[in-house]
Amino acid sequence: MPEQSPLDLTEGDPFGPHNLPYGVFTTADEPGRRRLGVRIGDHVLDAGAAAHALGSPYAALLAQPSLNPLLAAGRTAWRDVRRALTAWVTVPAHRPDIEPLLRPLGEVTLHLPYEVADYVDFYASEHHATNVGRIFRPDGDALTPNWKHLPIGYHGRSGTVVVSGTDITRPAGQRKAPADPAPVFGPSVKLDIEAEVGFLVGTPSELGRPVPLASFRDHVFGLTLLNDWSARDIQAWEYVPLGPFLGKSFATSVSAWVTPLEALDAARVAPPARDLPLLPYLDDGSDEEPGGFDLHITVRINGETVSEPPFSTMYWTAAQQLAHMTVNGASLRTGDLYGSGTVSGPEVHQRGSLLELTWNGQEPLELSTGKRTFLEDGDEVTLTAWAPGPDGTKVGLGEVTGRITPAR
């Protein structure tokens, strides 16, 4: 009986030909040679070798150690390469060339697939922002006056964006509880997660020229799951008046896979109704394409599900975030990454951070490994997600995992 081909996937595989996310991998026999790969089922296709074998005009672009050259090539190249890849893994005549270039995922090492240029993180979930406001301003308005007028964000640290599977060292810094007479220095005791979605910029923009809502697809290549680790105690002491700094900059974890926007066409949904008028550069009421994405996220700590945040509830869309990020004339660079902000839904089990899930430590989670208010050393956090695909399929997003190690 002939051996089953890796291209003969089980029905409903979330990493079928309708998905085809991009990553970068190395093999045990060539650990120093990074290659651009595309996931199909539980295998990864050497994209550069496939392009060379089949005489693709994009062979040189795909024979790179990073996704950045493809990102910079622009939307026409993104579309053409995706169409070619789909044909390579679905047309039976290509199997003799393609099958030898498939590697089992368990036999490769995955790397950060792009060089991060700039990193910006937003605060786009009304449910998350409301919860945080109620926690820290119980006698005041939950939302700040500007929240429904613009996507609030901060500029992060690109050099500490790490790929899934990288251990996260517990950060140290200054902290001061309200009742403490003076700040102290030491490891964070309120280490938290933020379940987010990251958007990866491909095509750059000109300095001084804002990027309008309608140009979102011309600049954004795809999306990835993202965990914006947060030291809440460090953040609380430092953030007035300039916002997050050391409480955020120690690490941001992203998936090893980038899902192209085209793979998520069936997952586009309208964002929640807005109850205030928007300024013209943010007003997406007349856009033909819905601005939201129907992504279903699961958060696990040590293998136990603690939350299932729905991305469809996000108040501000990725297109609005891009427009706001550039409205002052700030330019985009290939490899820019921006995060959605914590994804939280209206229900308790849909909150995307421990700050909300435990109400700042007042309501500990009950896990089989013990109660949790915030993360302990040795805890492993995993984010996974899926989205509706064409014809009833599911599109899988690559997971993001990180394990907490003690402060140094």
Image (cartoon, rainbow, N blue to C red):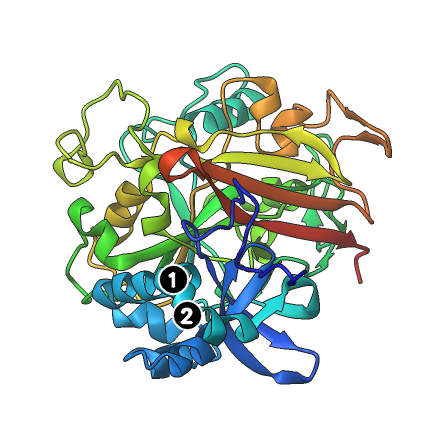
Identify whether 304 is placed above or below 63.
above
Image quarter hosting the C terminus: bottom right
Label 2 crowd (10 A; few <14 / some 14-19 / many >=20): some
Residue positioned most to the front: 1
Residue type, numbered disc 1: Val
Q: Is residue 31 above or below residue 264?
A: below
Q: Is residue 308 left or right of residue 339?
A: right
Residue in front for this viewpoint, 407 or 30: 30
Does residue 331 appear in the picture of this structure?
A: no
Q: Residue at x 60, y 49 (%)?
A: 399
- On screen, residue 152 above or below 156: above
For numbered disc 1, what is the local secondary structure? loop
- The residue type indicated by label 2 comes to His
Where residue 227 appears, as percent x and y from the top left, is: 57, 47
Q: Quadrant of the N terminus?
A: bottom right
On the image, numbered disc 2 is attached to which residue?
A: 94
**Residue 67 visible in the picture:** yes
Q: Percent position (x, y) of residue 340? A: 43, 43
**Residue 363 numbered mark, or none:** none
Determine which residue is flagged by label 1. Answer: 91
Q: Are marks 1 and 2 in contact (CB under 8 Å)?
A: yes
Residue farthest top in this picture: 139
Q: Circle 2 sits in a helix, a strand or a loop, which is it?
A: helix
**Can you tell which quarter of the image residue 388 is in?**
top left
Position of residue 337 relative to residue 127, above or below, is below
Residue drawn at x 17%, y 34% as measured from the top left = 283
Across and down, in percent, residue 177 comes to: 70, 35
Q: Is residue 396 left or right of residue 299?
A: left
Q: How many marks?
A: 2
Residue 354 at x, y percent in the picture = 66, 32
Viewer-side residue, 118 vs 403: 403
